[in-house]
Amino acid sequence: MNTSTDNKIQKFADEMVKKSLSKDQLSYPERMSLKLQELHEKTKQNLKPDRKEETDEIAGYLKDYMTQLMTEENLSEEDALNKAIAIFRAERPLSDEESKAQERQAYYQSIDPQIEESIGLGYASNLFIGIVLGAIIEIFGQILYSGNLIGIVFFLMLGLGLLLGIALGLNKHNRIISQK
């Protein structure tokens, strides 16, 4: 016999033996396993929404369309089923998530790689400009006020220069996107 068939037979026989034994004859791990299986089944039933009516309705439409295809186009049952499923899948309205995913995909496909690179270079160059301006202003300010080259003002001006660079980068990003 086939090994998968043998495994299925063995599993079925094992389940039958376990179900035929009383709870007193089962070991503690076997009782816990049965309890967990029962809990798993209950949880599955409670969490699974009941959409039987909608499922039956769609199945009815699908069966009617299949019989129509089999009579009108002389298709086999399998071919009619495949064609009906393809048509029903194509005509199904998109969910909000699917439509948003398609919009995102279309947006990312429409972006030109040169524009992306231009935006990135604009941010980087403006950050460097902001940092350098902040450092230059700090050095002159620190020398004028205390005579030291590096102090607390240095870090404050570097932070302000960094913010200036980000602001300039956002401005460049806006100009590039608005020209597109």
Image (tube, rainbow, N blue to C red):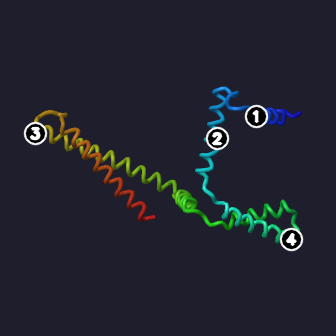
Q: Is residue 74 above or below residue 117?
A: below
> Spatial distance from mark 4 to mark 2, Cα to Cα?
49 Å
Say left or right for 147 vs 171.
left
Amino acid at the residue labelled 2: Glu
Which of pointers 2 and 3 lies earlier in the amino acid sequence? 2
The residue that label 2 is drawn on is 38
Say left or right for 35 vs 169.
right
In this view, the mark in front (4 or 2):
2
Which of pointers 3 and 4 lies earlier in the amino acid sequence? 4
Q: Position of residue 139 (x, y in %)?
A: 19, 39
Q: Position of residue 35 (x, y in %)?
A: 63, 36
> Spatial distance from mark 2 to mark 3, Cα to Cα?
78 Å
> Spatial distance from mark 2 to mark 1, Cα to Cα?
16 Å
The residue that label 4 is drawn on is 73
Which of pointers 2 and 1 lies earlier in the amino acid sequence? 1
Q: Residues within 10 Å of mark 4 (few under 14, many from 20)?
A: few
> Spatial distance from mark 1 to mark 4, Cα to Cα?
53 Å
Instruction: Give the numbered dot on residue 20.
Output: 1
Q: Position of residue 38 (x, y in %)?
A: 64, 41
In this view, the mark in front (2 or 3):
2
Amino acid at the residue labelled 4: Glu
In this view, the mark in front (2 or 1):
1
Name the residue located 77 percent from the left edge and 35 percent from the top edge: 16
Say left or right for 33 vs 61.
left
The quarter of the image holding the N terminus is: top right
Name the residue located 19 percent from the left edge and 41 percent from the top edge: 138
Q: Residues within 10 Å of mark 1 (few under 14, many from 20)?
A: few
Q: Is residue 131 above or below residue 83?
A: above
The residue that label 3 is drawn on is 145
